[in-house]
Image (tube, rainbow, N blue to C red):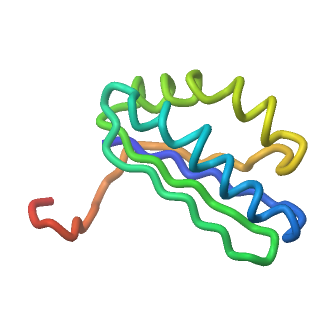
Amino acid sequence: MYGVVRRYRFDPQVSESIDHHVRIGVMQPVRETPGFVAYYWLDTGDGAGVSFSIFEDKAGADEATRRTADYVQTHLQRLMGDSETTEGVIQAHAPLWGGG
């Protein structure tokens, strides 16, 4: 599996708008990407947010980034600015549903 973490800083007053855009414009194309496993968005409420996406491989992660790039640039770039990105092969995990 392959994971991508993106960290953002933004004005806390736009949190609701960002959360809305993540739900309507980011999650669906990510979910439809081949190799998709999971996507999470965490908004701290104080001007910080983190997205964490998991794919079967790097190719899926790269494709999801490509699929969402236009939406993010058009609707979120002005609210959030650039992200700090960390990505790589997931070396260990403890899924809730067993296995692992």
Residue at image position (28%, 60%) is 92
Question: Picture coordinates of residue 99 (x, y %)?
Answer: 9, 61
Displayed quadrant of residue 17: bottom right
Q: Is residue 41 left or right of residue 80?
A: left
Displayed quadrant of residue 71: top right
Q: Is residue 55 left or right of residue 62?
A: left
Q: Residue furthest left?
A: 99
Quadrant housing the C terminus: bottom left
Q: Is residue 92 above or below residue 84?
A: below
Q: Is residue 95 left or right of residue 8?
A: left
Residue at image position (49%, 31%) is 29
Displayed quadrant of residue 11: bottom right
Q: Is residue 36 above or below residue 51?
A: above
Question: Picture coordinates of residue 15 (x, y %)?
Answer: 77, 64
Question: Picture coordinates of residue 23 (x, y %)?
Answer: 57, 49
Instruction: Name the residue nearer the viewer: 5 or 34.
Output: 34
Instruction: Name the residue nearer the viewer: 38 or 21.
Output: 21
Residue at image position (73%, 76%) is 45
Residue at image position (81%, 30%) is 74
Instruction: Name the residue nearer the viewer: 5 or 75.
Output: 75
How many circles with numbers are drawn on the protein? 0
Q: Is residue 3 left or right of residue 20?
A: left
Quadrant housing the N terminus: top left
Question: Picture coordinates of residue 84 (x, y %)?
Answer: 72, 50
Instruction: Name the residue nearer the viewer: 71 or 95.
Output: 71
